[in-house]
Image (cartoon, helix red, strand yellow):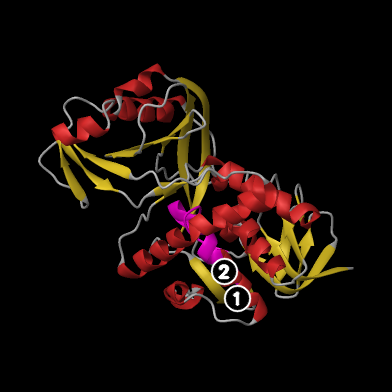
Amino acid sequence: MERYDAVIVGGGIIGLASAWRATQRGLRVCVLERERAGCGATWAAAGVLAPDPETPTFTALADRSADLWSAFAEELRESTGIDPGYTRCGSLVLSFDDSRPDGEWLEAHELHALEPGLAADCRGAALLEQDAQVDPRRAVDALCALLGDAVRTRTDVVELDPQGVVLADGSRIEGERVVLAAGAWTARRLAKRLPIVPVKGQTLRLHGPLPATRIIHSQHVYVVPRASGETVIGATIEDAGFDTTATDEATQTLLRQAIRAVPAVAGLQLVEAIASLRPATPDDGPLIGEWEGLIVAGGHYRNGILLAPITAEAVAAFLTGEEPPAETAPFDPRRFDLDV
């Protein structure tokens, strides 16, 4: 029977980053992914590195992880030659009325001097210079290159306990510790008492001349231009159970909202519409820590890419008996009354 220091269930960016940090501490790990690495929420994500919820404890967690991303990305690039596309490009939160979002306020004339491609009737915007982006797909490629055969794809875990997992073919893999990082499928298939529910989100990828130089936020849409010539538009928020079908309705809604904010988007070529399931929790905060003998790294909702570096540090710390980052403490999975 195979045995590892850590068996990590889930091959999205959280599971892969956690495995990488664990191997750097000398642990022998195995990552089990039921499809292909990064194929779920990671593959659909736009890679915006800016916090979503506004609770003080989450802001501290998000800020700390955002600070880690530059060095994290540089490590990936230097170790593999694969550039994950980390860029601190800043973002603009547009206003078409009298509202003023938080941030450095730019009047309309300042805004259009900075980003000429924005809608002419935009009244101003908040500039968030610290916001950054990364290409999640390239980050996954780099992590898989580093982990090599430790990542097993098309490997379906059907049962697990603190000492190991059972695969669909009936075989068992044992580990000193088991890490649960299976995203939105966690509660449905492996740990039904964890308060994780799926929230569907659709994103679009387009090619052509970049419509802006910064990330653009406007009402219910964001536009993420990349140096590669790709522009990502997202994202819907849908209560659709475990359905991952990309729909024409959602595509047209996203395009309409994006063109309203950045008219140049109309000239781009749509090359992909993809939907995925974000793992949400009752308070929109992640689950990072010990739970019934397992290590849980899940429930990251819309912030999985942003929180990958700090979650990976926390998981590696739990695996080796170190102290995890203090910012992760409020997100102990045991904060919910799971006996109800």
Q: Is 173 displayed left or right of 179 in the figure?
A: right
Q: Which residue is mark 1?
A: 317
Q: Quadrant of the N terminus?
A: bottom right
Q: Residues within 10 Å of mark 1 (few under 14, many from 20)?
A: some
**Label at residue 313:** 2
Q: Residue furthest front?
A: 78
Q: Is residue 296 in the magenta section?
A: yes
**Looking at the picture, how far across and down is residue 38, in whole percent?**
63, 47
Residue 289, picture quadrant: bottom right
Part of the protein shown in magenta = 295-311
Give, as a three-letter code, the residue at label 1: Ala
**Looking at the picture, how far across and down is residue 242, in whole percent?**
54, 45
Q: Is residue 96 visible?
A: no
**Looking at the picture, how far across and down is residue 162, in whole percent?**
70, 75
Q: Is 90 displayed left or right of 25 in the figure?
A: left
**Looking at the picture, how far across and down is residue 112, in whole percent?**
21, 30
Identify which residue is drawn at 81% across, 66% down: 173
Give, as a three-letter code, the residue at label 2: Glu
